Amino acid sequence: MKRLIVKFFNAYWLKEYIMLFRYYKLTSTLQRKKMLISVVDNRRNCQGLADRFKGIVSIYALSKALGMDFRCLYSYPFQLSDFLIPNEYNWLPEKDEISNSIKDVRFRIMRKELSVKRLTRVFPSNKQWHVYANVDYIEEINQLYNQDFQWGKLFHELFKPTKELEHKIQTQLSKVSGNDFIACAFRFQSMLGDFNEYNAKSLNENDKETLIEKNFIALKNIVESVNCLVLVTSDSTTFLSKAKLLDRVFTLPGKIVHVDCVTDEQNEVYMKLFVDFFMLSNAMKIYSIGTKQMYPSNFPVYAAKINDIPFERILIN
């Protein structure tokens, strides 16, 4: 009985109705038109930047399949429009377009264990559906609606860099003087003690050195096997400092943060996330390298999808 009660109170639908009555008004003077709205704010943990993009692009794809309007409300810990602006589709809401009434709004919390059918079975509906999603549902949407959506194409329909971000990207590209480069991405989380992620504990000093050396050797092997520059990205400044000792390796400047764990930085700090993402997307190929204890990040996976470039994971012992 206790397990059933716990399951009941952990149900997503209950959380959704709690959020609805907590954050929205009981009455509204205007009827808002129905639409799908992808939400990233401080009411829910939304994971890292790649996960946020997965959800946004998926909800956009669903809106196209259903012939519904789409908007994106991304306000935490920064305004997305400070870095990315509409490209072919205007996802920015107009004044008074988004309802704050219980009468008009329904929530959906979509996570990896859930099918997109949990959202699609509520249609047709005259509600505004405010959706928290961090999953790539493109394949499932294609199957359900006989579509051929491609993640990178959808991303480009939605987004282009602001002038400031584009300038920073071009500045980094100019440093390679038009030369081709590959990219190697390493995701240590808090294992090396130099990155804050959900207050996770770091390894002891001996294990840190062992892990750094394993990854450094793997990087060195790749550098020695190619005749081009190698961009190295990582969430560890410790590893980046060592990686730069190799010839033909270059890194990108800036403080490294996790977007779901740091809320009070200046936009210049968050800017690095976007510069890293787009620089990876400009490589000839991206490798994600790590041991089985390291997190298989989706950040380089989706950077590769932007421009449909080759991606490969390398698991080291």
Image (tube, rainbow, N blue to C red):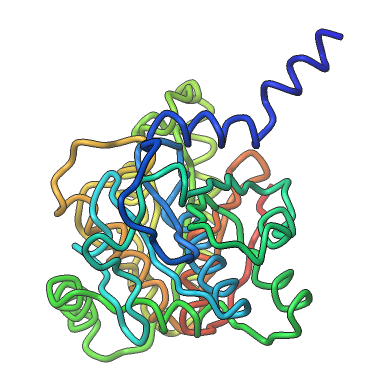
Q: Which image quadrant: the N terminus?
A: top right
Find residue 146 and report its image quarter: bottom right
| Residue farthest right in this picture | 1
| Residue farthest top in this picture | 2
Q: Is residue 110 found left or right of 254 in the rendered image?
A: right
In the depicted structure, whether residue 213 falls above or below residue 232: above
In the depicted structure, whether residue 306 falls above or below residue 6: below
Find residue 142 and report its image quarter: bottom right
How many marks are shown on the rendered structure?
0
Give whichever of 210, 96 is nearer the camera. Answer: 96
In the depicted structure, whether residue 282 falls above or below residue 99: below
| Residue farthest front in this picture | 29
Q: Is residue 223 found left or right of 295 in the rendered image?
A: left
* Residue at 19% in and 36% down: 264
**Residue 5 picture location, percent across and down:** 77, 14
**Residue 303 picture location, percent across and down:** 46, 70
In the depicted structure, whether residue 204 falls above or below residue 174: above
* Residue at 73% in and 16% down: 6
**Residue 213 picture location, percent across and down:** 50, 44
* Residue at 31% in and 89% down: 179
* Residue at 44% in and 70% down: 70
**Residue 233 picture location, percent across and down:** 38, 59
Give whichever of 168, 173 is nearer the camera. Answer: 168
